């Protein structure tokens, strides 16, 4: 295994500790049958097929998911084992993405990989030792920390400066060094508030961010598991840029370089 790849995370690790969860929501990942087999539907190659089905070809943009995965998986945050990724497709398929996945650089290879995933429900590493992607049962909300915030990115959300926003989340703060106390009853009394504070901090799970893997619509506000929506710019941003900003701010906050 390459030294730069993060170790696989256990189910408990994914919902605890100093991590951030990203859900790529409403991703248009769909297999279509063509003359010579199966392909991942997209607006360029299957325009006629989509129009015949009375669907808008402009909405079939799986390349957006490809761009987002490259941004997320290539980030130092992911390589440090601090990132958890899920994909929720427009067809209500939930996909769990391993931090060890090396996403193909070209769209053609990416499309082939996802056709295999959606048909076989699992992608293994070449040596067969690790599952790199798998289809899991829904809803996606059951994989998110019950005690963690679920925040959606939306052009109609409350405008925030992302750097200040992540600093304001108690569950995202680096752990503080404990106070050195004298021995005796006085020390025990002084330690009690610290124990309560530690217990309160443990009650906060990792924050989850919902990013729409779409070109036009705004899926985050429609998700029943999203608690609040924020906007991080005065301008419309691509999904990949949103993912990049999330990674950059948490890398700065946690000193991941």
Image (spheres, grey):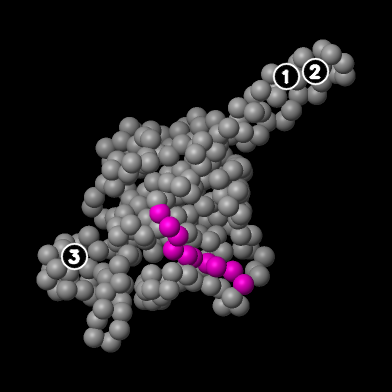
User: Callout 1 environment at 10 Å: few (<14), some (14 to 19), or many (20+)?
Assistant: few
Q: Tell me: 99 left or right of 149.
A: right
Q: Position of residue 207 (x, y in %)?
A: 49, 40
Q: Position of residue 58 (x, y in %)?
A: 20, 62
Q: Is mark 1 in CB contact (under 8 Å) with mark 2?
A: yes
- Rounded to the nearest angstrom, the CA distance separating label 3 from label 2 is 66 Å
- Rounded to the nearest angstrom, the CA distance separating label 1 from label 2 is 6 Å
Extent of the magenta region: 129-138
Q: Position of residue 234 (x, y in %)?
A: 30, 38
Can residue 217 be seen in this snapshot? yes
- N-terminal of the two: label 3 or label 1? 3
The disc label shown at residue 192, or none:
1
What is the residue that sits farthest to the right in this orientation? 183
Q: Tell me: 210 left or right of 235.
A: right
Above/below status of 117 relative to 202 = below
Secondary element at tag 2: helix
| The N terminus sits in image quarter | bottom right
* Residue holding disc 2: 188
- N-terminal of the two: label 3 or label 2? 3
Q: Tell me: 234 left or right of 84.
A: left
Above/below status of 4 relative to 173 = below
- Nearer to us: label 3 or label 1: 1
């Amino acid at each position: 295994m390459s030294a730069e790849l993060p170790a696989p995370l256990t189910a408990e690790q994914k919902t605890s500790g100093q991590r951030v969860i990203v859900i790529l929501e409403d991703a248009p990942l769909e297999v279509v049958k063509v003359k010579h087999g199966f392909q991942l539907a997209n607006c360029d190659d299957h325009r006629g097929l989509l129009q015949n089905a009375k669907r808008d070809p402009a909405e079939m943009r799986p390349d957006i998911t490809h761009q987002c995965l490259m941004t997320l998986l290539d980030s130092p945050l992911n390589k440090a084992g601090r990132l958890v990724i899920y994909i929720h497709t427009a067809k209500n398929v939930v996909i769990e993405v391993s931090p060890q996945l090396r996403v193909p650089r070209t769209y053609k290879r990416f499309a082939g990989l996802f056709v295999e995933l959606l048909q076989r429900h699992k992608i293994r590493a070449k040596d067969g030792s690790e599952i790199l992607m798998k289809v899991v049962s829904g809803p996606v909300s059951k994989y998110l920390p019950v005690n963690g915030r679920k925040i959606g990115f939306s052009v109609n959300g409350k405008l925030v400066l992302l750097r200040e926003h992540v600093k304001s989340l108690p569950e995202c703060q680096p752990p503080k060094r404990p106070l050195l106390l004298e021995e005796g009853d006085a020390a025990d009394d002084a330690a009690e508030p610290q124990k309560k504070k530690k217990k309160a901090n443990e009650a906060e799970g990792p924050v989850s961010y919902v990013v729409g893997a779409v070109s036009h619509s705004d899926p985050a506000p429609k998700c029943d598991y999203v608690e609040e929506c924020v906007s991080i710019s005065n301008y419309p941003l691509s999904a990949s840029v949103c993912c990049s900003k999330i990674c950059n701010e948490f890398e700065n906050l946690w000193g991941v370089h």
